[in-house]
Amino acid sequence: MKLHLRAAWKALRGYAAAQENRASAWSPSGGSANGEVGMAAASVARRARDAVRNDPYAARIVDLWTGNAVGAGITTRWPETAHRNAWQAWADSTACDAEDKLDLYGLQALAMRAVVESGECFIRLLTVPTSARNPIGLSLQVLESDHLDTARNGVVDGAPTIQGIALGSAGEPIGYWLFPTHPGAWMLPGARLASNFIPARDVLHVFRKRRPGQLRDVSWLAPVLLRLRDLGDYEAALLMKAKIEACLAAVVTDDGEETLTKPSDSNPGLLRDAQGRAVESFEPGMILYRRGQGDVSVVNPSGGGSHTAFARRSLEAAAVGAGLTYDQVSGDLTQANYSSLRAGKIEFRRLCEQMQYGMLIPMLVRPIAERFHVQGALLGLWADAMPKGVAHVPPAHEMIDPLKDTTALIAQVRAGFVPQPEAAGAFGYDFRSAVEMIREANAALDAAGISLDTDPRRVAKSGGTQDAAQMAAVEIAATGAAGAQAYSAEAPTASAPAPG
Protein backbone atom coordinates (compact mmCIF):
# COMPACT_ATOMS: atom_id res chain seq x y z
CA MET A 1 0.00 0.00 0.00
CA LYS A 2 2.82 2.40 0.88
CA LEU A 3 4.51 1.67 -2.45
CA HIS A 4 1.34 2.60 -4.31
CA LEU A 5 1.01 5.85 -2.37
CA ARG A 6 4.66 6.71 -2.96
CA ALA A 7 4.26 6.07 -6.70
CA ALA A 8 1.14 8.24 -6.82
CA TRP A 9 2.95 11.03 -4.98
CA LYS A 10 5.87 10.90 -7.40
CA ALA A 11 3.47 11.07 -10.35
CA LEU A 12 1.73 14.08 -8.80
CA ARG A 13 5.07 15.84 -8.30
CA GLY A 14 5.74 15.48 -12.03
CA TYR A 15 3.26 18.29 -12.77
CA ALA A 16 4.26 21.67 -11.42
CA ALA A 17 0.64 22.86 -11.57
CA ALA A 18 -0.36 20.00 -9.25
CA GLN A 19 2.20 20.74 -6.54
CA GLU A 20 0.78 22.45 -3.49
CA ASN A 21 4.03 24.27 -2.67
CA ARG A 22 4.11 25.80 -6.18
CA ALA A 23 0.47 26.71 -6.44
CA SER A 24 -0.79 26.89 -2.89
CA ALA A 25 -2.99 29.89 -3.67
CA TRP A 26 -4.54 28.16 -6.68
CA SER A 27 -7.77 26.56 -5.47
CA PRO A 28 -10.02 25.62 -8.40
CA SER A 29 -13.52 24.56 -7.51
CA GLY A 30 -13.71 21.45 -9.67
CA GLY A 31 -17.41 22.00 -10.32
CA SER A 32 -19.32 20.84 -13.38
CA ALA A 33 -19.81 23.07 -16.38
CA ASN A 34 -23.37 23.84 -15.35
CA GLY A 35 -22.39 24.43 -11.74
CA GLU A 36 -19.67 26.90 -12.68
CA VAL A 37 -21.89 28.76 -15.13
CA GLY A 38 -24.86 28.88 -12.80
CA MET A 39 -22.85 30.59 -10.08
CA ALA A 40 -21.30 33.19 -12.38
CA ALA A 41 -23.48 33.79 -15.44
CA ALA A 42 -25.79 36.48 -14.03
CA SER A 43 -23.04 38.54 -12.35
CA VAL A 44 -20.71 38.34 -15.34
CA ALA A 45 -23.53 39.28 -17.73
CA ARG A 46 -24.41 42.39 -15.71
CA ARG A 47 -20.78 43.49 -15.57
CA ALA A 48 -20.27 42.76 -19.26
CA ARG A 49 -23.28 44.89 -20.20
CA ASP A 50 -21.99 47.70 -18.02
CA ALA A 51 -18.59 47.44 -19.72
CA VAL A 52 -20.21 47.51 -23.18
CA ARG A 53 -22.12 50.64 -22.19
CA ASN A 54 -19.09 52.45 -20.79
CA ASP A 55 -15.87 50.90 -22.07
CA PRO A 56 -15.01 51.55 -25.75
CA TYR A 57 -12.92 48.40 -26.09
CA ALA A 58 -15.64 46.13 -24.67
CA ALA A 59 -18.16 47.68 -27.08
CA ARG A 60 -15.66 47.18 -29.89
CA ILE A 61 -15.28 43.47 -29.08
CA VAL A 62 -19.04 42.89 -29.30
CA ASP A 63 -19.27 44.86 -32.55
CA LEU A 64 -16.35 42.94 -34.09
CA TRP A 65 -17.76 39.51 -33.35
CA THR A 66 -21.21 40.51 -34.58
CA GLY A 67 -19.87 42.15 -37.74
CA ASN A 68 -17.61 39.24 -38.67
CA ALA A 69 -19.77 36.27 -37.66
CA VAL A 70 -23.07 37.64 -38.99
CA GLY A 71 -22.24 40.72 -41.05
CA ALA A 72 -25.08 41.44 -43.44
CA GLY A 73 -26.60 38.07 -42.55
CA ILE A 74 -26.17 34.31 -43.03
CA THR A 75 -28.34 33.61 -46.05
CA THR A 76 -30.32 30.44 -46.74
CA ARG A 77 -30.40 29.16 -50.32
CA TRP A 78 -33.44 27.10 -51.29
CA PRO A 79 -33.30 24.89 -54.40
CA GLU A 80 -37.04 25.24 -55.08
CA THR A 81 -38.86 28.31 -56.34
CA ALA A 82 -41.77 28.11 -53.88
CA HIS A 83 -39.45 28.11 -50.89
CA ARG A 84 -37.26 30.86 -52.35
CA ASN A 85 -40.15 33.23 -52.99
CA ALA A 86 -41.79 32.67 -49.60
CA TRP A 87 -38.44 32.93 -47.82
CA GLN A 88 -37.58 36.20 -49.54
CA ALA A 89 -40.97 37.72 -48.66
CA TRP A 90 -40.62 36.61 -45.03
CA ALA A 91 -36.91 37.06 -44.30
CA ASP A 92 -36.48 40.41 -46.05
CA SER A 93 -39.37 42.04 -44.20
CA THR A 94 -39.85 42.93 -40.55
CA ALA A 95 -42.84 40.57 -40.37
CA CYS A 96 -40.52 37.82 -39.13
CA ASP A 97 -39.79 39.89 -36.00
CA ALA A 98 -42.32 39.68 -33.18
CA GLU A 99 -41.56 43.36 -32.47
CA ASP A 100 -41.83 44.24 -36.19
CA LYS A 101 -38.53 46.17 -36.12
CA LEU A 102 -35.85 43.98 -37.76
CA ASP A 103 -35.66 41.61 -40.69
CA LEU A 104 -34.23 38.12 -40.28
CA TYR A 105 -30.63 39.23 -40.71
CA GLY A 106 -31.07 42.00 -38.17
CA LEU A 107 -32.39 39.39 -35.73
CA GLN A 108 -29.32 37.24 -36.40
CA ALA A 109 -27.07 40.18 -35.49
CA LEU A 110 -29.14 40.93 -32.38
CA ALA A 111 -28.88 37.31 -31.23
CA MET A 112 -25.12 37.26 -31.84
CA ARG A 113 -24.66 40.47 -29.84
CA ALA A 114 -26.59 38.94 -26.94
CA VAL A 115 -24.49 35.77 -27.07
CA VAL A 116 -21.18 37.68 -26.94
CA GLU A 117 -22.41 40.12 -24.31
CA SER A 118 -24.41 37.79 -22.05
CA GLY A 119 -23.20 34.33 -23.06
CA GLU A 120 -26.51 33.06 -24.40
CA CYS A 121 -29.72 34.05 -26.11
CA PHE A 122 -33.21 32.60 -26.51
CA ILE A 123 -35.44 32.86 -29.60
CA ARG A 124 -39.08 31.92 -29.28
CA LEU A 125 -40.82 30.56 -32.38
CA LEU A 126 -44.33 32.02 -32.41
CA THR A 127 -47.26 31.16 -34.66
CA VAL A 128 -49.06 34.23 -36.04
CA PRO A 129 -51.73 34.81 -38.73
CA THR A 130 -50.47 34.59 -42.29
CA SER A 131 -50.17 37.65 -44.51
CA ALA A 132 -48.50 38.75 -47.74
CA ARG A 133 -45.39 39.71 -45.76
CA ASN A 134 -45.55 36.57 -43.62
CA PRO A 135 -46.90 33.79 -45.86
CA ILE A 136 -46.01 30.98 -43.46
CA GLY A 137 -47.25 32.54 -40.19
CA LEU A 138 -43.98 32.35 -38.24
CA SER A 139 -42.60 35.08 -35.96
CA LEU A 140 -39.37 35.22 -33.94
CA GLN A 141 -38.96 36.77 -30.49
CA VAL A 142 -35.38 37.35 -29.28
CA LEU A 143 -34.98 37.16 -25.47
CA GLU A 144 -32.01 37.95 -23.24
CA SER A 145 -30.58 35.34 -20.91
CA ASP A 146 -32.33 37.01 -17.94
CA HIS A 147 -35.66 35.58 -19.12
CA LEU A 148 -34.53 32.10 -17.99
CA ASP A 149 -35.84 31.26 -14.51
CA THR A 150 -32.62 29.81 -13.10
CA ALA A 151 -34.22 29.35 -9.65
CA ARG A 152 -36.08 26.28 -10.88
CA ASN A 153 -33.92 23.29 -10.00
CA GLY A 154 -34.51 19.68 -9.07
CA VAL A 155 -37.55 17.75 -10.26
CA VAL A 156 -40.08 20.27 -11.58
CA ASP A 157 -43.39 18.96 -12.97
CA GLY A 158 -41.88 15.48 -13.16
CA ALA A 159 -38.79 16.45 -15.19
CA PRO A 160 -35.23 16.91 -13.87
CA THR A 161 -34.48 20.60 -14.18
CA ILE A 162 -31.19 22.47 -14.00
CA GLN A 163 -31.27 26.28 -13.82
CA GLY A 164 -34.65 26.48 -15.53
CA ILE A 165 -33.89 23.93 -18.28
CA ALA A 166 -35.97 20.74 -18.16
CA LEU A 167 -34.09 17.66 -19.33
CA GLY A 168 -35.06 14.39 -20.96
CA SER A 169 -33.78 10.90 -20.25
CA ALA A 170 -30.59 11.46 -22.28
CA GLY A 171 -29.94 14.88 -20.76
CA GLU A 172 -31.33 16.76 -23.75
CA PRO A 173 -33.38 19.94 -23.14
CA ILE A 174 -37.10 19.29 -23.47
CA GLY A 175 -38.31 22.69 -22.29
CA TYR A 176 -37.39 26.02 -20.74
CA TRP A 177 -38.90 27.97 -17.85
CA LEU A 178 -39.00 31.53 -19.20
CA PHE A 179 -40.31 34.77 -17.73
CA PRO A 180 -42.83 36.44 -20.08
CA THR A 181 -41.21 39.84 -19.36
CA HIS A 182 -37.68 40.79 -18.46
CA PRO A 183 -37.15 40.52 -14.67
CA GLY A 184 -35.60 43.98 -14.74
CA ALA A 185 -38.91 45.38 -16.04
CA TRP A 186 -41.15 43.90 -13.36
CA MET A 187 -42.49 47.35 -12.49
CA LEU A 188 -44.28 47.62 -15.84
CA PRO A 189 -48.10 47.48 -15.67
CA GLY A 190 -49.33 43.91 -15.95
CA ALA A 191 -45.84 42.39 -15.66
CA ARG A 192 -45.68 39.03 -13.91
CA LEU A 193 -42.77 37.39 -12.13
CA ALA A 194 -44.02 33.81 -12.63
CA SER A 195 -42.17 31.83 -15.31
CA ASN A 196 -43.91 29.66 -17.91
CA PHE A 197 -42.81 26.31 -19.32
CA ILE A 198 -42.08 26.53 -23.06
CA PRO A 199 -41.42 23.28 -24.97
CA ALA A 200 -37.97 23.02 -26.54
CA ARG A 201 -39.50 22.75 -30.03
CA ASP A 202 -40.66 26.36 -29.67
CA VAL A 203 -37.39 27.77 -28.28
CA LEU A 204 -33.94 28.13 -29.80
CA HIS A 205 -31.14 28.36 -27.23
CA VAL A 206 -27.98 29.83 -28.78
CA PHE A 207 -24.73 29.63 -26.84
CA ARG A 208 -21.12 28.57 -27.28
CA LYS A 209 -20.71 25.05 -25.95
CA ARG A 210 -17.22 24.65 -24.48
CA ARG A 211 -17.54 21.59 -22.21
CA PRO A 212 -19.39 18.25 -22.50
CA GLY A 213 -22.76 18.40 -20.79
CA GLN A 214 -22.79 22.18 -20.74
CA LEU A 215 -26.29 23.69 -20.91
CA ARG A 216 -25.47 27.43 -20.68
CA ASP A 217 -22.53 29.78 -21.12
CA VAL A 218 -21.12 32.99 -19.67
CA SER A 219 -20.27 36.24 -21.43
CA TRP A 220 -17.41 36.04 -23.91
CA LEU A 221 -15.98 39.09 -22.12
CA ALA A 222 -15.48 37.12 -18.88
CA PRO A 223 -11.70 36.53 -19.39
CA VAL A 224 -11.01 40.20 -20.17
CA LEU A 225 -13.43 42.23 -18.03
CA LEU A 226 -11.02 42.79 -15.14
CA ARG A 227 -8.15 43.63 -17.46
CA LEU A 228 -10.26 46.18 -19.35
CA ARG A 229 -11.47 47.67 -16.09
CA ASP A 230 -7.91 47.95 -14.76
CA LEU A 231 -6.86 49.64 -17.99
CA GLY A 232 -9.74 52.09 -17.68
CA ASP A 233 -8.85 52.86 -14.05
CA TYR A 234 -5.20 53.30 -15.00
CA GLU A 235 -6.06 55.71 -17.81
CA ALA A 236 -8.40 57.65 -15.49
CA ALA A 237 -5.58 58.00 -12.97
CA LEU A 238 -3.22 59.14 -15.72
CA LEU A 239 -5.76 61.69 -16.86
CA MET A 240 -6.04 63.09 -13.34
CA LYS A 241 -2.24 63.15 -13.11
CA ALA A 242 -2.03 65.02 -16.42
CA LYS A 243 -4.58 67.55 -15.20
CA ILE A 244 -2.51 68.18 -12.08
CA GLU A 245 0.65 68.47 -14.17
CA ALA A 246 -1.07 71.14 -16.25
CA CYS A 247 -1.90 73.24 -13.19
CA LEU A 248 0.68 76.04 -13.46
CA ALA A 249 0.03 78.34 -10.49
CA ALA A 250 1.69 81.28 -8.71
CA VAL A 251 1.86 81.56 -4.91
CA VAL A 252 2.13 85.10 -3.54
CA THR A 253 3.45 85.41 0.00
CA ASP A 254 2.23 88.71 1.48
CA ASP A 255 3.73 90.24 4.62
CA GLY A 256 1.09 93.00 4.91
CA GLU A 257 -1.10 93.35 8.00
CA GLU A 258 -4.40 93.87 6.18
CA THR A 259 -4.94 91.43 3.34
CA LEU A 260 -7.74 89.39 1.92
CA THR A 261 -5.77 86.32 2.85
CA LYS A 262 -5.52 86.86 6.53
CA PRO A 263 -4.92 83.41 7.93
CA SER A 264 -6.91 81.98 10.73
CA ASP A 265 -5.33 81.20 14.06
CA SER A 266 -5.64 77.48 13.43
CA ASN A 267 -4.20 77.51 9.89
CA PRO A 268 -1.69 80.35 9.63
CA GLY A 269 -0.13 79.01 6.40
CA LEU A 270 -3.33 78.10 4.53
CA LEU A 271 -3.41 78.95 0.79
CA ARG A 272 -6.26 81.23 -0.26
CA ASP A 273 -7.51 82.80 -3.47
CA ALA A 274 -8.03 86.53 -4.13
CA GLN A 275 -11.41 86.43 -2.37
CA GLY A 276 -9.91 84.96 0.77
CA ARG A 277 -11.42 81.48 0.31
CA ALA A 278 -9.37 78.43 1.24
CA VAL A 279 -8.06 76.47 -1.77
CA GLU A 280 -8.21 72.70 -1.68
CA SER A 281 -7.56 71.87 -5.38
CA PHE A 282 -5.46 73.34 -8.17
CA GLU A 283 -6.61 74.75 -11.49
CA PRO A 284 -4.46 75.94 -14.42
CA GLY A 285 -3.39 79.57 -14.10
CA MET A 286 -4.36 80.03 -10.43
CA ILE A 287 -2.83 82.78 -8.29
CA LEU A 288 -2.77 81.87 -4.59
CA TYR A 289 -1.98 83.93 -1.48
CA ARG A 290 -0.55 83.14 1.94
CA ARG A 291 0.83 85.07 4.93
CA GLY A 292 4.58 85.24 5.33
CA GLN A 293 7.60 87.10 4.09
CA GLY A 294 7.04 88.84 0.75
CA ASP A 295 7.74 86.46 -2.11
CA VAL A 296 6.30 85.03 -5.39
CA SER A 297 6.89 81.37 -6.32
CA VAL A 298 5.64 79.26 -9.24
CA VAL A 299 4.05 75.81 -8.83
CA ASN A 300 4.78 73.77 -11.99
CA PRO A 301 4.29 70.00 -11.47
CA SER A 302 6.61 67.76 -13.46
CA GLY A 303 5.30 65.63 -16.30
CA GLY A 304 5.06 61.85 -16.28
CA GLY A 305 6.25 59.17 -18.67
CA SER A 306 4.38 57.48 -21.48
CA HIS A 307 1.89 54.69 -20.77
CA THR A 308 1.78 53.44 -24.38
CA ALA A 309 3.63 50.20 -23.67
CA PHE A 310 1.34 49.26 -20.75
CA ALA A 311 -1.82 50.12 -22.67
CA ARG A 312 -0.66 48.16 -25.71
CA ARG A 313 0.17 45.09 -23.63
CA SER A 314 -3.19 45.26 -21.86
CA LEU A 315 -5.08 45.52 -25.15
CA GLU A 316 -3.06 42.68 -26.66
CA ALA A 317 -4.07 40.44 -23.76
CA ALA A 318 -7.70 41.59 -23.98
CA ALA A 319 -7.75 40.90 -27.72
CA VAL A 320 -6.31 37.41 -27.25
CA GLY A 321 -8.83 36.64 -24.53
CA ALA A 322 -11.69 37.75 -26.78
CA GLY A 323 -10.43 35.73 -29.77
CA LEU A 324 -9.56 38.81 -31.81
CA THR A 325 -6.37 40.50 -32.98
CA TYR A 326 -4.76 43.57 -31.43
CA ASP A 327 -5.26 45.72 -34.51
CA GLN A 328 -8.97 44.87 -34.55
CA VAL A 329 -9.60 45.82 -30.93
CA SER A 330 -7.35 48.86 -30.75
CA GLY A 331 -7.68 50.13 -34.33
CA ASP A 332 -3.89 50.66 -34.25
CA LEU A 333 -2.38 49.77 -37.63
CA THR A 334 0.90 51.66 -37.21
CA GLN A 335 2.96 48.47 -36.91
CA ALA A 336 0.90 46.31 -39.26
CA ASN A 337 1.81 45.17 -42.76
CA TYR A 338 0.30 42.82 -45.33
CA SER A 339 1.97 39.70 -43.90
CA SER A 340 1.07 40.40 -40.28
CA LEU A 341 -2.50 41.37 -41.14
CA ARG A 342 -2.97 38.26 -43.26
CA ALA A 343 -1.51 35.93 -40.63
CA GLY A 344 -3.75 37.40 -37.94
CA LYS A 345 -6.85 37.35 -40.11
CA ILE A 346 -6.31 33.71 -41.12
CA GLU A 347 -6.40 32.58 -37.48
CA PHE A 348 -9.36 34.81 -36.69
CA ARG A 349 -11.32 33.62 -39.72
CA ARG A 350 -10.84 30.00 -38.68
CA LEU A 351 -12.26 30.82 -35.27
CA CYS A 352 -15.04 32.87 -36.86
CA GLU A 353 -16.00 29.99 -39.16
CA GLN A 354 -16.06 27.70 -36.15
CA MET A 355 -18.60 30.03 -34.53
CA GLN A 356 -20.64 30.19 -37.75
CA TYR A 357 -20.72 26.47 -38.55
CA GLY A 358 -20.52 25.22 -34.96
CA MET A 359 -22.96 27.58 -33.25
CA LEU A 360 -24.94 30.02 -35.40
CA ILE A 361 -25.96 27.69 -38.22
CA PRO A 362 -26.86 24.55 -36.18
CA MET A 363 -28.42 26.45 -33.26
CA LEU A 364 -30.07 29.38 -35.03
CA VAL A 365 -30.11 29.49 -38.85
CA ARG A 366 -30.86 25.86 -39.72
CA PRO A 367 -33.59 25.38 -37.04
CA ILE A 368 -35.34 28.54 -38.28
CA ALA A 369 -35.23 27.22 -41.87
CA GLU A 370 -36.57 23.84 -40.75
CA ARG A 371 -39.42 25.46 -38.81
CA PHE A 372 -40.10 27.70 -41.82
CA HIS A 373 -40.47 24.60 -44.00
CA VAL A 374 -42.72 22.85 -41.47
CA GLN A 375 -45.00 25.88 -41.20
CA GLY A 376 -45.32 26.08 -44.99
CA ALA A 377 -45.98 22.35 -45.27
CA LEU A 378 -48.78 22.61 -42.72
CA LEU A 379 -50.34 25.35 -44.85
CA GLY A 380 -50.04 23.21 -48.00
CA LEU A 381 -47.49 25.47 -49.72
CA TRP A 382 -45.14 22.54 -50.47
CA ALA A 383 -44.53 18.87 -49.70
CA ASP A 384 -43.81 17.58 -46.21
CA ALA A 385 -40.28 16.39 -47.00
CA MET A 386 -37.50 18.92 -46.52
CA PRO A 387 -35.96 19.67 -49.95
CA LYS A 388 -32.41 18.49 -50.55
CA GLY A 389 -29.65 20.94 -51.28
CA VAL A 390 -30.62 23.68 -48.81
CA ALA A 391 -27.46 25.72 -48.14
CA HIS A 392 -26.65 28.26 -45.46
CA VAL A 393 -24.02 30.72 -46.68
CA PRO A 394 -22.17 33.01 -44.24
CA PRO A 395 -21.04 36.45 -45.42
CA ALA A 396 -17.81 36.63 -47.37
CA HIS A 397 -14.61 37.87 -45.76
CA GLU A 398 -13.10 40.89 -47.43
CA MET A 399 -9.73 40.32 -49.05
CA ILE A 400 -6.71 42.01 -47.49
CA ASP A 401 -5.08 42.45 -50.91
CA PRO A 402 -7.75 41.77 -53.60
CA LEU A 403 -5.27 41.43 -56.48
CA LYS A 404 -2.99 38.95 -54.71
CA ASP A 405 -5.83 36.97 -53.16
CA THR A 406 -7.83 36.79 -56.41
CA THR A 407 -4.79 35.64 -58.39
CA ALA A 408 -4.13 32.92 -55.82
CA LEU A 409 -7.77 31.79 -55.85
CA ILE A 410 -7.83 31.58 -59.66
CA ALA A 411 -4.67 29.45 -59.58
CA GLN A 412 -6.21 27.12 -56.98
CA VAL A 413 -9.40 26.68 -59.03
CA ARG A 414 -7.49 26.06 -62.27
CA ALA A 415 -5.28 23.49 -60.52
CA GLY A 416 -8.34 21.70 -59.16
CA PHE A 417 -7.41 22.31 -55.53
CA VAL A 418 -10.60 24.33 -54.92
CA PRO A 419 -13.93 23.47 -56.60
CA GLN A 420 -15.54 26.39 -58.37
CA PRO A 421 -18.67 26.27 -56.15
CA GLU A 422 -16.41 26.67 -53.12
CA ALA A 423 -14.69 29.64 -54.76
CA ALA A 424 -18.07 31.31 -55.31
CA GLY A 425 -19.01 30.55 -51.71
CA ALA A 426 -15.88 32.37 -50.52
CA PHE A 427 -17.50 35.56 -51.80
CA GLY A 428 -20.83 34.82 -50.12
CA TYR A 429 -22.59 33.53 -53.27
CA ASP A 430 -24.46 30.30 -53.84
CA PHE A 431 -22.92 28.70 -56.94
CA ARG A 432 -26.26 27.88 -58.59
CA SER A 433 -27.47 31.44 -58.08
CA ALA A 434 -24.18 32.82 -59.38
CA VAL A 435 -24.42 30.68 -62.54
CA GLU A 436 -27.96 31.88 -63.15
CA MET A 437 -26.93 35.53 -62.72
CA ILE A 438 -24.01 35.07 -65.12
CA ARG A 439 -26.28 33.40 -67.68
CA GLU A 440 -28.79 36.23 -67.47
CA ALA A 441 -26.04 38.85 -67.77
CA ASN A 442 -24.51 37.15 -70.83
CA ALA A 443 -27.91 36.84 -72.49
CA ALA A 444 -28.64 40.53 -71.89
CA LEU A 445 -25.24 41.58 -73.33
CA ASP A 446 -25.66 39.34 -76.38
CA ALA A 447 -29.18 40.63 -77.02
CA ALA A 448 -27.88 44.20 -76.90
CA GLY A 449 -24.94 43.39 -79.15
CA ILE A 450 -22.41 44.45 -76.52
CA SER A 451 -19.05 42.72 -76.24
CA LEU A 452 -16.87 43.56 -73.23
CA ASP A 453 -13.20 42.77 -72.84
CA THR A 454 -14.07 41.17 -69.47
CA ASP A 455 -16.14 38.47 -71.20
CA PRO A 456 -14.02 35.26 -71.12
CA ARG A 457 -16.26 33.68 -73.76
CA ARG A 458 -14.90 36.10 -76.34
CA VAL A 459 -11.65 37.47 -74.91
CA ALA A 460 -8.69 35.35 -73.88
CA LYS A 461 -6.66 36.04 -70.75
CA SER A 462 -3.90 37.54 -72.90
CA GLY A 463 -6.31 40.18 -74.20
CA GLY A 464 -6.77 38.73 -77.71
CA THR A 465 -9.97 37.21 -79.04
CA GLN A 466 -10.73 33.58 -78.37
CA ASP A 467 -10.05 31.05 -81.15
CA ALA A 468 -12.60 30.28 -83.83
CA ALA A 469 -13.96 27.14 -82.14
CA GLN A 470 -14.63 29.01 -78.92
CA MET A 471 -16.25 31.91 -80.71
CA ALA A 472 -18.43 29.53 -82.73
CA ALA A 473 -19.63 27.93 -79.51
CA VAL A 474 -20.51 31.35 -78.14
CA GLU A 475 -22.47 32.21 -81.28
CA ILE A 476 -24.34 28.91 -81.14
CA ALA A 477 -25.41 29.70 -77.60
CA ALA A 478 -26.32 33.28 -78.50
CA THR A 479 -27.91 33.12 -81.97
CA GLY A 480 -28.20 29.46 -82.91
CA ALA A 481 -26.48 27.31 -85.59
CA ALA A 482 -27.14 29.79 -88.44
CA GLY A 483 -25.25 32.50 -86.62
CA ALA A 484 -22.35 30.13 -85.90
CA GLN A 485 -22.01 29.23 -89.60
CA ALA A 486 -22.03 32.90 -90.57
CA TYR A 487 -19.41 33.61 -87.93
CA SER A 488 -17.16 30.71 -89.07
CA ALA A 489 -16.97 32.16 -92.57
CA GLU A 490 -15.57 35.41 -91.21
CA ALA A 491 -13.76 34.13 -88.10
CA PRO A 492 -10.96 36.40 -86.89
CA THR A 493 -7.54 35.03 -86.10
CA ALA A 494 -6.39 34.45 -82.51
CA SER A 495 -4.00 37.36 -82.74
CA ALA A 496 -6.67 39.90 -83.64
CA PRO A 497 -7.23 42.68 -81.14
CA ALA A 498 -9.92 42.26 -78.55
CA PRO A 499 -13.35 43.65 -79.36
CA GLY A 500 -14.27 46.83 -77.58
Image (tube, grey):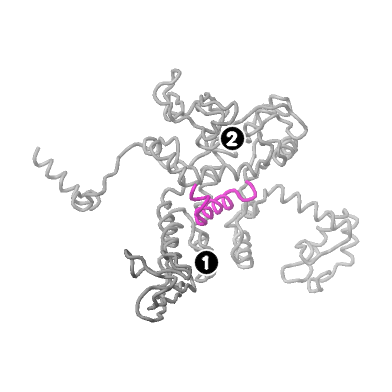
Q: Residue furthest left?
A: 2
Please tell me whether residue 398 belongs to the stretch shown in magenta.
Answer: no
Write the start and end of the magenta stretch as one range: 50-73
Look at the numbered disc 2 and give the secondary structure of its residue.
helix
Relative placement, left or right, of 185 versus 73 is: left
Answer with the quarter of the image where residue 288 lies: bottom left
Mark whose residue sits in front, 2 or 1: 1
From the image, tell me which residue sits under label 1.
Answer: 332
Label 2 vs 1, first from the N-terminus: 1
User: Is residue 68 one of those drawn in magenta?
Assistant: yes
Q: Residue furthest top?
A: 158
Q: Position of residue 234 (x, y in %)?
A: 41, 61
Q: Residue at x 79, y 71 (%)?
A: 494
- Location of mark 2 (residue): 367
Percent x, y of residue 222: 43, 48
- Nearest the eye: 248 or 435: 248
